[in-house]
Image (cartoon, rainbow, N blue to C red):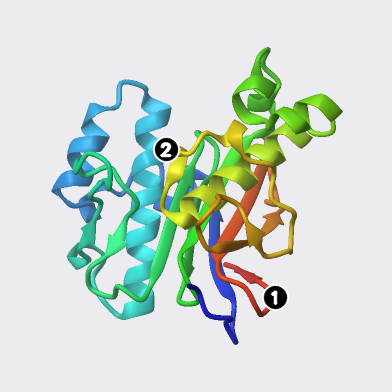
């Protein structure tokens, strides 16, 4: 059971891939062996670049917070389902510091918190406009009302759900269409039997590509405050 918290704060970094890596080329020198191997497997340049940018951002900013060299940080990514190293990152050097990453070709995000497990998700708004989106992402009750069936509301629904599932540590092992979209600012049960989650929407600025962004934190009690960097 999650106890009510007296402080609920998430630190959030949103960067274009170039800004995250402070230059034209991804800052791969700070990545570890697992990250490098994953980066090298990407076939599309944009995907490889945003992956490297997101992980370099995490290492650089968390290293700064802890007073450590970015390349020295140790992460565990063991998947709870299959044991492969592609699960939610956990900082072995400071397990009480929770983090979450998300990325698109145009935007990368890092969320960090000591208030509890955290999740962040970013998505291009146009990504929610394809035929069949509602069946993939929305609860049958949401599809029936049509309230969030199309972009931009559809993109908001998706990032809220995925951010909440990331915070809970279950990710897309839970079908987003099996759950209703969490209400912003209200702690509530997202998945039956799991702790409550509080969620807020974030507006990235500037954002020429058009993104929806949401941050979620496990727990209830104090209002969730997101501090932008």
Residue most toward the left?
Answer: 33
In the depicted structure, whether residue 142 falls above or below residue 11: above
Can you tell which quarter of the image residue 41 is in?
top left
Q: Residues within 10 Å of mark 2 (few under 14, many from 20)?
A: few
Left or right of residue 212, residue 167 in this image: left
2 vs 1, front mark: 2
Determine the CA span between mark 2 and mark 1.
28 Å
The disc placed on residue 223 is: 1
Residue drawn at the location 47% of the way across and 56% of the way down? 168
At which x and y percent is residue 122? Answer: 57, 43
Which residue matches tag 2? 173
Q: Of 163 and 139, which appears nearest the observer?
A: 139
Q: Helix, strand or loop at disc 2?
A: helix
Residue most toward the bottom?
Answer: 6
Q: Helix, strand or loop at disc 1?
A: loop
In the depicted structure, whether residue 200 falls above or below residue 67: above
The disc placed on residue 122 is: none
In the depicted structure, whether residue 155 falls above or below residue 94: above
At which x and y percent is residue 140? Answer: 71, 28
Q: Of 36 and 115, which appears nearest the observer?
A: 115
Q: Residues within 10 Å of mark 1 (few under 14, many from 20)?
A: some
Q: Does residue 134 appear in this view?
A: yes
Residue drawn at the location 55% of the way across and 37% of the way down? 106
Residue drawn at the location 36% of the way across and 74% of the way down? 64
Residue drawn at the location 66% of the way across and 80% of the way down? 222
Can you tell which quarter of the image residue 139 is in?
top right
Residue most toward the top?
Answer: 131
In the depicted structure, whether residue 172 falls above or below residue 165: above
Left or right of residue 146, residue 190 in this image: left
Q: Does residue 25 appear in this view?
A: no
Left or right of residue 224, residue 118 in this image: left
Please tell me which of labels 2 and 1 falls first in the chain.
2
């Amino acid at each position: 059971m999650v106890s009510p918290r007296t402080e609920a704060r998430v630190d959030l970094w949103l960067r274009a891939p170039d800004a995250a890596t402070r230059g034209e080329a991804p800052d791969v020198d700070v990545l570890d062996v697992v990250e490098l191997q994953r980066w090298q497997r990407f076939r599309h340049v944009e995907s490889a670049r945003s992956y490297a940018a997101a992980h370099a951002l995490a290492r650089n900013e968390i290293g700064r917070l802890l007073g450590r060299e970015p390349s020295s940080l140790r992460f565990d990514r063991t998947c709870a389902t299959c044991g492969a190293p592609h699960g939610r990152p956990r900082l072995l050097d400071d397990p009480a510091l929770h983090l979450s990453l998300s990325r698109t070709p145009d935007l990368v995000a890092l969320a960090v918190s000591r208030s509890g497990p955290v999740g962040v998700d970013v998505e291009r708004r146009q990504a929610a406009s394809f035929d069949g989106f509602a069946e993939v992402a929305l609860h049958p009750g949401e599809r029936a009302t049509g309230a969030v069936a199309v972009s931009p509301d559809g993109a908001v629904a998706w990032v809220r759900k995925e951010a909440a599932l990331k915070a809970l540590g279950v990710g897309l092992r839970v079908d987003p269409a099996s759950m209703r979209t969490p209400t912003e600012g209200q702690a509530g049960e997202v998945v039956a039997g799991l702790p409550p989650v509080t969620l807020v929407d974030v507006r990235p600025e500037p954002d020429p590509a058009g993104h929806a962004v949401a941050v979620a934190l496990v727990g209830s009690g104090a209002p969730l405050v997101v501090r932008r960097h």
